[in-house]
Amino acid sequence: MNLIARFNAWERLMRLDKPIGILLLAWPTLWALWVSGGGKPSPFMVWIFMLGTVLMRSAGCVMNDYADRNFDGHVERTKNRPLATGEVGTREALLLAAGLSLCAFVLILPLHRLVIMLSFVALFLAASYPFTKRFLAIPQAYLGIAFGFGIPMAYAAQLYVVPPVAWLLLAANVFWAVAYDTEYAMVDRDDDLKIGIRTSAITFGRFDVAAVMVCYAITLALLALYGHLEGLGRWYNAGLVVAAGIAAYHYTLIRGRDRKQCFRAFLHNNWLGAAVFAGVLADYWLR
């Protein structure tokens, strides 16, 4: 394999060609950065966290494919992933994940020591999540913690403590992750049943659509409480109203349980996260 082909395989292994995961990881981090920074986080801080998001999401994808390398070949959507096809070896994948994680760690060295301590927890969550699909009934909840751990880190970076509201925001992210990743899992449910992987779509069964909508409702309720406690006002709440409308639209997509529509709903969650962030921005700019 020549160098260009090798880089192409790495890009697909890190899912850089599919940025939705980066966006779903970035929005909660941006919410926390802006609110903990009083609406004015330093550009340097934002740069560190956004680049770290890309690096850690890429490392997480590599670890996910490493963990699922013996399963992906049996799933229609994942059968052509580099580890499943043998384009990338297991040792090479582990070295790539380690290198990405090391780069992310170097990024946060200028920050407060609490951020560095929390980074070890974040690394453990990212590395262990792929294996939770073997034994957790709803591994998506674990994913929500892993995807949202930039929240306490953002608070720690700017306030040097992690206040209770940060954990409240993390809880909101957990329910959001269960909602959108259940939509994602609904795409692969038949294949996952055959190979024995556990997902929320399988656990919820015929109540999957109802469970997704309940998780959206809890997410929005927790975000509303978070906004109240942080002193956010009507523009933030307007963003939540838009987000609620987006969640309602997702119901129209997933109620028939069509694979393509469920995947479309999953991808559309980018706009839900963006709506909440737009509300945060507007609330600080227009107050």
Image (spheres, rainbow, N blue to C red):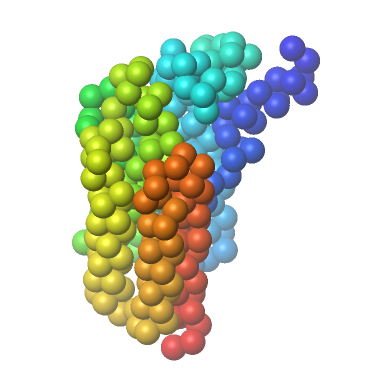
Residue furthest front in the image: 256
Q: Nearer the viewer, residue 263 or 38?
A: 263
Residue 209: where, in percent of width, then height?
A: 30, 49
**Residue depicted at x 33% and y 35%:** 125
Residue 134: where, in percent of width, then height?
A: 28, 22
**Residue depicted at x 39% and y 43%:** 257
Image quadrant in which you'd find residue 217 = bottom left
Image quadrant in which you'd find residue 140 = top left
**Residue depicted at x 64% and y 38%:** 17
Residue furthest bottom in the image: 287
Q: Nearer the viewer, residue 227 or 245?
A: 245
- Camera sees residue 157: no
Picture quarter with the C terminus: bottom left
Residue 68: where, in percent of width, then height?
A: 42, 20
Q: Is residue 190 above or below residue 105?
A: above
- Camera sees residue 79: yes
Picture quarter with the N terminus: top right
Q: Is residue 170 left or right of residue 90?
A: left
Q: Is residue 145 left or right of residue 236?
A: left
Q: In this view, does 247 lie above or below 134?
A: below
**Residue depicted at x 23% and y 30%:** 136
Q: Nearer the viewer, residue 254 or 56?
A: 254
Residue 71: where, in percent of width, then height?
A: 43, 17
Q: Is residue 197 above or below residue 148?
A: above
